[in-house]
Image (cartoon, rainbow, N blue to C red):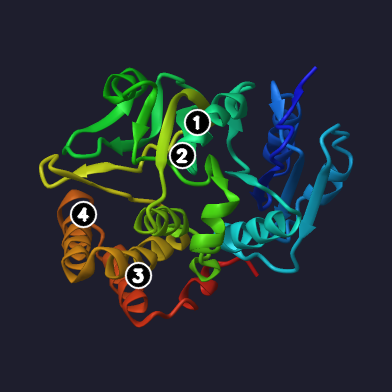
Amino acid sequence: MPEPSNETRRIVAVVVTFNRRDMVTRLVAALDAGSVVPDEVIVVDNASSDGTADALAAAGTTTPLTVLRLTENTGGAGGFHTGLAAAMERGADLVWLMDDDGTPSADCLQSLLPHLATHDFIGPAVVSEDDPGRLCFPIRVPGSSRVVHAVPDLEAASTSGLLEGVVIPFNGVLVTRELVERIGLPREEFFIWGDDVEYLWRARAAGARIATVVGSRFRHPSTDDLGTPLMFGRTTYNHSPSDLKHYCMCRNNVVNLRAHRGLVGVLAFVVKTFWFYLFTRRDVGRLRLSIEAMRAGWRGDFTGHRRFLDG
């Protein structure tokens, strides 16, 4: 029988979903079956049209489940903004944030909790659900140019089971109430892409104590196009075949880099984008879309993605 999450700290899990009925019900069942379970699960439903609401209503979990059904799709950014705000209003001391397409291992939460004495923003190793020895998202080791792609390399780069200063946000990450009160909520206007990075960078700027708990696991579908090599392997680029994702990635990256890395960071991203779509995967149409999105990011215009939404 699962143990209660904590006798003195209230833990609320926040899941954001959109038209992934089977995935989100699988995730809710995994949360309910953990060796340690949250005190409440909040699912933010971004106006799904695939029967998600009915499936969640019939989930039959023992862990209290609250579904916040929005009237329009606000993306992952809007969903996490809404869900984190709701968790805080419900008195959460710790909030466990995750997308609907991943699943935590049975001991994921249990293995994160002991590190809260020294950290306030921690997360598991995010691994491919098809190949648990492979990381879903490449991780650059702090203080070096080394990028690791495999779990053994992540373990080798860690100290006492932790990789300090690094976490993959919104994929099973645990954040303290105190940190949320310091840095606020995710930027809902981002819609998708980069809201997690912005939140991580904001946390770093506020002095958050951040780490990946290498022994903790969160399974996630493979993301083969993320971290595509370019410039003769000297760097990588996050290519996506989706125009919606690409537009938001380019726009939001410019916003993030301008705020946290300055003009040099923005220019480096612009150069990488031109190189990728002129030389690595030549696509003049995608380059035009990139330029439009980057201009919108520079202006702070968060409306352009709407034309890619269904309906």
Task: Give the CA separation, mark 4 to mark 3.
Answer: 20 Å
Res 28 → quadrant: top right
Task: Give the CA separation, mark 2 to mark 4.
Answer: 37 Å
Lower sequence index among marks 4 and 3? 3
Task: Give the CA separation, mark 1 to mark 4.
Answer: 40 Å
Lower sequence index among marks 3 and 1? 1
- Disc marking residue 255: 3
Asked whether disc 2 touches disc 1, contact meaning CB atoms under 8 Å apart, the reply is yes
Mark nearer the viewer, 2 or 4: 2
Amino acid type at mark 3: Val
Res 262 → quadrant: bottom left
Q: Residues within 10 Å of mark 3 (few under 14, many from 20)?
A: many
Query: Which residue matches tag 2?
Result: 119
- Disc marking residue 276: 4
Which residue is depicted at the point 53% across and 41% down? 173
Q: Position of residue 109 (x, y in %)?
A: 61, 29
Which residue is depicted at the point 43% across and 80% down? 301
Asked whether disc 4 touches disc 3, contact meaning CB atoms under 8 Å apart, the reply is no
Find numbered disc 1 in the image and state the secondary structure of the residue it sits on.
helix
Task: Determine whether 91 is above or below 121 in the image.
Answer: below
Task: Determine whether 201 is above or below 131 in the image.
Answer: below
